[in-house]
Structure formats: structure tokens, C-alpha cells
Image (spheres, rainbow, N blue to C red):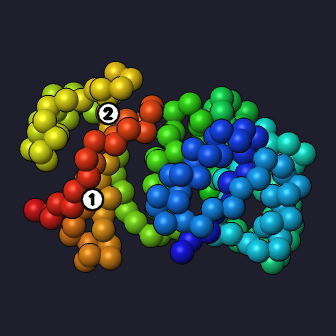
Amino acid sequence: MRTILIALKNQNMINNFRKSFTDNDFEVKTTTDGNEALRSILEDPPEMVLADANLNNLNAFDLLEKIEENEEVNKVPLIVFSQTGAKLHREKALELEAKDFIVGYSDSPRETAMRVKRHLGDEKAYIFKMISNPQAGAELAEDLGYGRETKCSSCEKDLSLYLLRRLELGGDIFQVSLFCPNCSKKYGESDKKAI
């Protein structure tokens, strides 16, 4: 089982991310404090860290620098989480060689879990945003047995199609589901053989 440390300022956000990661077979450690995050990384290095750009005491950028300085943990990848997606945060994450940059208002916990799995090499996934081509999206959803609906019934936002290559089943099977990136509502899930 993979391990992730989630170090976010907001406990509600931690709870949302914890559910998505545990649903994806991760052991999850959490904290709202940067000093505690660093202590956890040094004592029992996780396979991935998701850290808030505005974390208390030591923020994500401080953690990146501290991890880099320590030879025992300098290979632990860290993803910077920013609630606002500020340009300064994105630039600093790139400068410090963060593994990825997640924006809280546009990247759902489910999408984040999928991205982490891809970074760790566990799975290969594709996300097709239905809004990019609504007609083709509706046709594809219908062909996959989901009907022609491309809007979330709960929040009316555009749905995304998620294709996850199931490497453990030989690589030609995809787990297919529609989901809402806004409220994380999932619309069915099934395995489909690639043509």
C-alpha cells in the first residue's frame, strides 16, 4: 500500500483528500503544521507529500528546501497545493522542482489522487473534459452506456470522463467513469476492453 502525507492548512480539505486517497488504496498521514510534516517525513518518509503553499510554520516551499538539504529524504516527491493558484506559487514550485502543482479550486481530490498515482507509476489515466467538445463528449458517454448527459445533476457543472488503464489486468482494460470535478460526484464505473 502506498503512503502519502497530506499537509494542508484546512482540516476540511484534509478530510476531503483523505477520503479520495483511502478510496484509491493509500495509507494516509495528515497534519496542519509544517514542522510536524517535516518531522513525519524525516522519521518515516512517505512515497509522496501533498503540502499547502500556505501551511502553518513551514509551508510547502520551506518543506521542499528542507527535503532537498537532507540526503536521506531528498528523493521524496512533493506536490504543492495552492488554494488560489497564484502565479507566484506556481513559479516558486517550478523553481524548487516540485513534482506537481495542484490548484484547490480547479483540481478535485479525486483528480489529485489520480495524478499522484500517475506520478508514482501505478497507473496511467486520461481525463477528458466534456466541455472541450460537448457533442463528441455526449456521443462518447452514450457509447459507453452513460446516456448523453454532460452536466452534473447536483451542481450543473460540466462532467469529465475518466479513463484509468488497469495495468494489473494486462493494460488493455480501462476503468471508465464520468465524474464531476467540482463536487466529486461519480456516475458509474465499469471496466471496458480497449478496441
Residue drawn at 24 percent across, 29 percent down: 150
Q: Nearer the viewer, residue 20 or 114?
A: 20
According to the picture, the residue beneath numbered tag 2 turns out to be 159
Q: Quadrant of the C terminus?
A: bottom left
Badge 1 element: strand
Asked if residue 72 shows in the view, the reply is yes
Question: x%, y% of residue 160?
Answer: 32, 38
Could you classify mark 1 by the number of other residues whose Cα lies within 10 Å: few (under 14), some (14-19), or many (20 or more)?
Answer: some
Q: Residue furthest top?
A: 156
Q: Is residue 60 left or right of residue 145?
A: right
Question: x%, y% of residue 79?
Answer: 65, 53
Label number found at residue 62? none
The mark tally for this picture is 2
Up-down: is 133 above or below 186?
A: above
Question: x%, y% of residue 16?
Answer: 57, 44
Distance from disc 1 to disc 2, alpha carbons, whole Å, reads 16 Å
Badge 2 element: loop
According to the picture, the residue beneath numbered tag 1 turns out to be 175
Q: In the image, what residue type sits under mark 2?
A: Leu
Q: Is residue 111 left or right of residue 158?
A: right
Which comes sooner in the sequence, label 1 or label 2? 2
Q: Is residue 81 left or right of residue 170?
A: right
Location of residue 183 by image quarter: top left
Q: Is residue 34 left or right of residue 109?
A: right
Up-down: is 136 above or below 70?
A: above
